[in-house]
Amino acid sequence: MKLKIKKINISIVGTGLMGLQHIKAILKSQKANLHSIVDISKNAKNLSKKYKVPLYSNVVELLKSQNLDAVIVATPNQLHEKHTVSFLKNKIPVLLEKPISDNLKSAKKIIDISKRNKIPLLIGYHRRHNSIVSKVKNIISTGKLGKIVSANVLCWIYKHKEYYKEKWRVSKGGGPLGINLVHDIDMICYLLGPIKYVQAFTTNKNRKFKIEDTATVSLIFKSGALCTLNISDTIVAPWSYELTAGENPAYPRTNQSAYMIGGTKGSLQFPNLKYWFYKKERSWWNKILVRKDKNRKDDNTLINQINHFSDVVIKKTKPKVNGNDGLISLKIFAAIKKSAMSGKKVKI
């Protein structure tokens, strides 16, 4: 006879793009239950009726509710501190959507409150919960690629006009660097280790908002490896993690790759998992072989993250992506912004 597992009651604060995906993930999870929704939008009212859960107009109302175990904060970056601190002070574990905040001072405050109250804080870099990423991490860690020499990351997408009707998306921290590239920064650090220097160039010539629409970033890792990150939300192209991983049904999958990582013994591209190598002598005059992984898709990533969050809440495990991870990504992001303004290399 199977014992019935008590599900963790999670509230969603903010029902934008990621908030909706978290709701869907919770509904599919065997470990979590949708407790409620916090939002003031018309769509939130519809969601409340559809899923038959309470709707609260603010955090204060939610904190008065019963049987609340944890929350997912998916509000605009500028509101992360205000909302997250409220929950942490009330001993409620938080899964905070990336980035941790829109500035370093705010991020440090969030982490400090979490530590002081001994309440779990997880950052929503959900890609670390993808089984494909776990495979890539293992391939690199076991030395299959040899010494990592260089990497290339592409994030070319085209965002429609409707996307920018939300004012926060055209304000500080709302550009593709803060919204999209922070994921890639966390990912490449997770795979290749700490970064020593960054140099970046940005432009807003296409959309003409105050925030950037295109950027190139060069990274120098402490290991000596180099990496180039290239991002734009004004390019029609199939090469971005969102469009290649197949982990989020909101994005049509292109079956291409967005990452290329090269070492002295071989190279790897993913999410379209292909491993390139020589069978005998390593020489460009010899035929290079390729091995493809059949399992090139994991659409359970967000569910995996919810299950992990639930395990953290019941103290079964520790956060896979904690506040310090979020702070590191934000520091790198701040250095990128500083470099873009000065045109100089910036030390992390």
Image: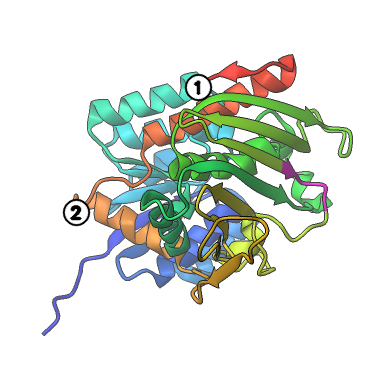
Residue 342 place in picture, x, y as percent = 72, 14
- Residue at the spot 52% in from the left edge and 68% down from the top edge: 49
In-front residue for pair 125/185? 185
Q: Is residue 237 left or right of residue 256?
A: right
The amino acid on which the numbered mark 1 sits, given as a three-letter code, is: Leu
337 vs 124, nearest the viewer: 337
Q: Secondary structure at mark 2?
A: loop
Mark 1 = which residue?
A: 104
Residue sitting nearer the eye, 15 or 135: 135
Quadrant the N terminus occupies: bottom left
Circle 2: residue type: Lys
In percent of width and height, residue 42 lies at 64, 56
Q: Dot 1 lies on which element?
A: helix
Instruction: Name the N-terminal-most of marks 1 and 2.
Output: 1
Vertical side of 154 occupied by 322: above or below: above
Residue at 51% x, 63% y is 280
Residue carrying label 2: 316
Instruction: Write down the quadrant of residue 117 in the picture.
Output: top left
Within-10-Å neighbours for mark 1: few <14, some 14–19, many 20+: some
Image: 210 above or below 290: above
Residue extending farthest left = 1
Q: Residue at x 86, y 39 (%)?
A: 207
Residue 101 visible, this angle: no
Q: Which residues are magenta?
A: 231-235
Q: As drawn, is 251 to the left or to the right of 273? A: right
Instruction: Please give the label number shown on residue 278.
Output: none
* Residue 80 in the image, given as x and y percentages of width and height: 50, 34
- Residue farthest to the bottom, as pictured: 1
- Number of labelled discs? 2
Q: How is the protein colored in the picture?
A: rainbow
Q: Main secondary structure of the magenta part?
A: loop
